[in-house]
Image: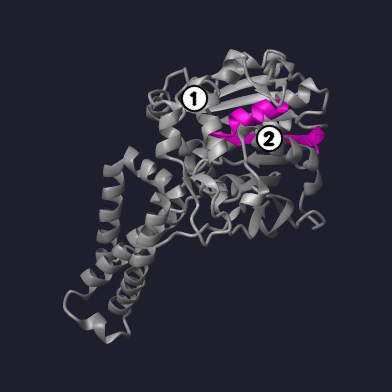
Amino acid sequence: MLYQMHELGRAWLAPMTYYADAMSKAFGAPGSWLHTVPGASELSAGYELFYRLGKDYEKPRFEIHEVEIDGRAFPVVERETLRKPFCRLLHFKRFADDVEGVQALADDPTVLVVAPLSGHHATLLRDTVRTLLRDHDVYITDWVDARMVPVSEGPFHLDDYIAYVEEFIRTIGAADLHVISVCQPTVPVLAAVSLMAARGETTPRSLVMMGGPIDTRENPTKVNDLATHRPMSWFETQLIHPVPAPFPGAGRRVYPGFLQHMGFVAMNPERHFESHWDFYQNLLEGDLEDAASHRRFYDEYNAVLDMPAEYYLDTVRIVFQQHLLPKGEWEVRGQKVDPSKIKGTALLTIEGELDDISGRGQTRAAQKLCTGIPESDREHFVVEGAGHYGIFSGRRWRTQVYPKVRDFFVEHSKN
């Protein structure tokens, strides 16, 4: 019922947002007679702010069309390598392999970036992918909004997520592959590689785990506290709702994206209020660069997806409440998850000094579990001054984290 009420509210608000968008442009366009009306700039800015607060945010595009290599720009094409009901495996193909004067890219390390299925779309890692493309052949998991998946496709559990990761690794080819997991997927990625190792399968050459909840008993955050201070029945009754018509996934039980977004904003309401006020002031002052930056950020931040209920509840129970992975008590489809079985894969764990989502020590816990990996093939890196997003996006990612990751891949790539 809550989901239906939300969609009705959005439908009721839609005409007003369209009107606000039109009036913002009318009062703001230099060629419009309304632009000469006293207070036109204030009206234009106010209407745009209302429009952006009320509009529906669609899934963003990666918009990665070229990469600069050795000072020259070369085209990049986004290709779908494999499609599953709940995820697409995307490949960013660089067309520079045979260009004279450019180092052959065929020998560049192949990287699979496993994006979070935790509210935002995989495009949140756009900066991660764009930077990696300078020196790597890049794949990424693009998770599908659960409200777009028909009920006939069946449920999606955390076990299914792990199975997807295993299949993606096999599809690309594990022998020369490096895997990066960002935040939430550190747990299922570690599980997937552990299970593959236990079965005697070839595992990736290296794993890079960034800001993930391997062991949330270490330095718990507000996010962890919410999961541990509520019973599972509360999550099921308060956060899980059926998808309404006319979406393709009508009837599927999900953790709706709009509820997740409310939780994101509630963590730092003052910061978001100040950001929107600054945006209004930037429009009045004609600071178009800062205004455009605000639009880009919130176009991404406000675009959210629904998570399958089974997957979300499994994650709360297994990762945040019962801590089955670090306690050595997790079984996936009858097979025990034992990270000590991993032997031929190097491990790099990365944490942000100021991470308020995955506290310091939670990702490093993987080092204690992967005892089969020699110490010479294991590293841990703390990014000073970085919060959660700073370890995979922005200046610190590009100048501090990426060089570390790049060198780690080179060191552990096939000669």
* Horizontal relation, residue 169 to residue 288: left or right: right
Based on the picture, tell me whether residue 272 belongs to the magenta stretch. no
**Which residue shows up at 75% across the image and 29% down it?**
205
Numbered mark located on residue 179 in the image: 2
Based on the picture, tell me whether residue 185 belongs to the magenta stretch. yes
- Which region shows up in magenta? 173-193
Q: Residue 20: image x %, image y %?
A: 31, 71
* Element on which disc 2 rests: strand
Residue 109 seen in the figure: no
Is 157 or 346 nearer to us in this picture? Answer: 157
Mark 2 and mark 1 in contact? Answer it, CB < 8 Å: no
Numbered mark located on residue 178 in the image: none
Is 147 or 264 nearer to us in this picture? Answer: 147
How far apart are the alpha carbons under marks 2 and 1? 23 Å
Q: Which residue is mark 1?
A: 320
Q: Residue 388: image x %, image y %?
A: 46, 35
Q: Nearer the viewer, mark 2 or mark 1?
A: 1
**Which residue shows up at 47% across the image and 39% down it?**
389
Of callouts 2 and 1, the N-terminal one: 2
Badge 1 local density, few (<14 within 10 Å), some, or many (20+)?
many
Q: Residue 390: image x %, image y %?
A: 47, 38
* Horizontal relation, residue 52 to residue 210: left or right: left
Q: Residue 343: image x %, image y %?
A: 76, 18
* Horizontal relation, residue 342 to residue 37: left or right: right
Is 127 or 140 nearer to us in this picture? Answer: 140
**Which residue shows up at 43% across the image and 19% down it?**
219
Residue 98 sits in quarter: bottom right
